Image (spheres, rainbow, N blue to C red):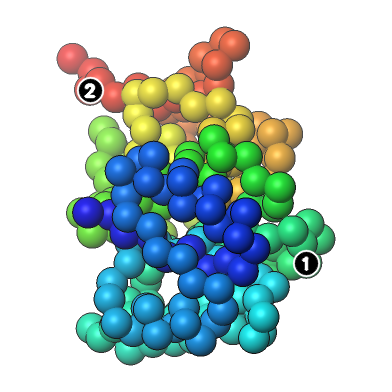
């Protein structure tokens, strides 16, 4: 069963997040401070962590850094996905958490649909990382190394462009709205206008035919191979 660790000292928020996790038929465990959260991570594996930044015994980023520095092959797994959920809305707080290894950042008050979408995306991302490369026609994408190749030639993408492309490939042939692309990338790619800019750059680098615009819905990558 998919297991989530919720690190949150506000009982209302933690109960709301736990209810969301259980609604997906996942198992939720709640810890209210850094010390007990680290002990839980040392004792058993979790599929993802929901992490507040303001905790009674310190900063949530302290736990994030400790997790990312853990030795591979032991508990905890340093690659465990972490979604930060914080009332801090400043850009510097979000960028700092992402730079320290957070997989996504959501600002309180939370919208449960957004949290659920990001969590599902993180779990798909972990499956993708385990499976290895994604191949679509003459396009090859490696989520682990962030390597992209088109028709045998390497393609340089920014982190945001890579996140948009990965989201569309993982969900192909489903069309994703700009908001869904944001959610599936852990809110790494900016607002809706920024998504359009990234799509424009991807088309210039990978060809106009790869990413299709679905009027009134968003963008998609065709899942069928040409005959």
Q: Is residue 91 left or right of residue 56?
A: right
Estimate the spatial distance between the alpha carbons at disc 2 and disc 1, rounded to whole Å.
Answer: 43 Å
Quadrant where the C terminus sits is top left
Percent x, y of residue 222: 35, 22
In the rendered image, residue 26, in percent from the top left (x then y), is placed at 32, 49
For image coordinates 33% across by 67% down, the residue present is 46
At label 1, counting other C-alpha atoms closer than 10 Å, the crowd grade (few under 14, some 14-19, many 20 or more) is few
Q: Quadrant of residue 61?
A: bottom right
List x then y, in percent, for residue 6. Answer: 48, 63
User: Residue lying furthest right in this view?
Assistant: 90
Residue at 69% over, 65% down: 95
Q: Is residue 89 left or right of residue 76?
A: right
Q: Is residue 92 visible?
A: yes
Q: Quadrant of residue 74?
A: bottom left
The residue mark sitting in front, 2 or 1, is 1
- Which residue is painted at 23% across and 83% down in the image? 73
Residue at the spot 37% in from the left edge and 78% down from the top edge = 41
**What secondary structure is found at the residue carrying circle 1?**
helix
Which residue carries the number 2 mark? Answer: 225
**Which residue is under mark 1?**
92
Query: Can you say whether 170 is above or below 52 in the image?
Result: above
Percent x, y of residue 216: 59, 11
Nearer to us in this view, 140 or 7: 7
């Amino acid at each position: 069963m998919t297991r989530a660790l919720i690190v949150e000292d506000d009982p209302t928020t933690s109960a709301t997040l736990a209810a969301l996790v259980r609604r997906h038929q996942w198992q939720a465990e709640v810890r209210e401070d850094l010390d007990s959260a680290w002990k839980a991570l040392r004792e058993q594996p979790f599929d993802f962590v929901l992490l507040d930044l303001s905790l009674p015994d310190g900063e949530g980023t302290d736990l994030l850094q400790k997790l990312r520095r853990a030795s591979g092959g032991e508990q905890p797994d340093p690659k465990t996905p972490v979604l930060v959920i914080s009332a801090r809305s400043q850009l510097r707080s979000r960028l700092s958490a992402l730079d320290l290894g957070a997989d996504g950042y959501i600002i309180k008050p939370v919208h449960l649909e957004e949290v659920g979408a990001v969590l599902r995306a993180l779990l798909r991302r972990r499956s993708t990382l385990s499976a290895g490369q994604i191949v679509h026609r003459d396009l090859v994408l490696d989520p682990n190394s962030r390597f992209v190749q088109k028709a045998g030639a390497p393609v340089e993408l920014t982190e945001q462009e890579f996140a948009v492309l990965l989201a569309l490939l993982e969900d192909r042939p489903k069309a994703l709205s700009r908001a869904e692309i944001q959610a599936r990338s852990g809110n790494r790619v900016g607002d809706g206008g920024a998504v359009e800019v990234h799509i424009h750059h991807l088309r210039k680098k990978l060809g106009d035919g790869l990413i299709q615009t679905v009027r009134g819905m968003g963008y998609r990558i065709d899942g069928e191979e040409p005959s």
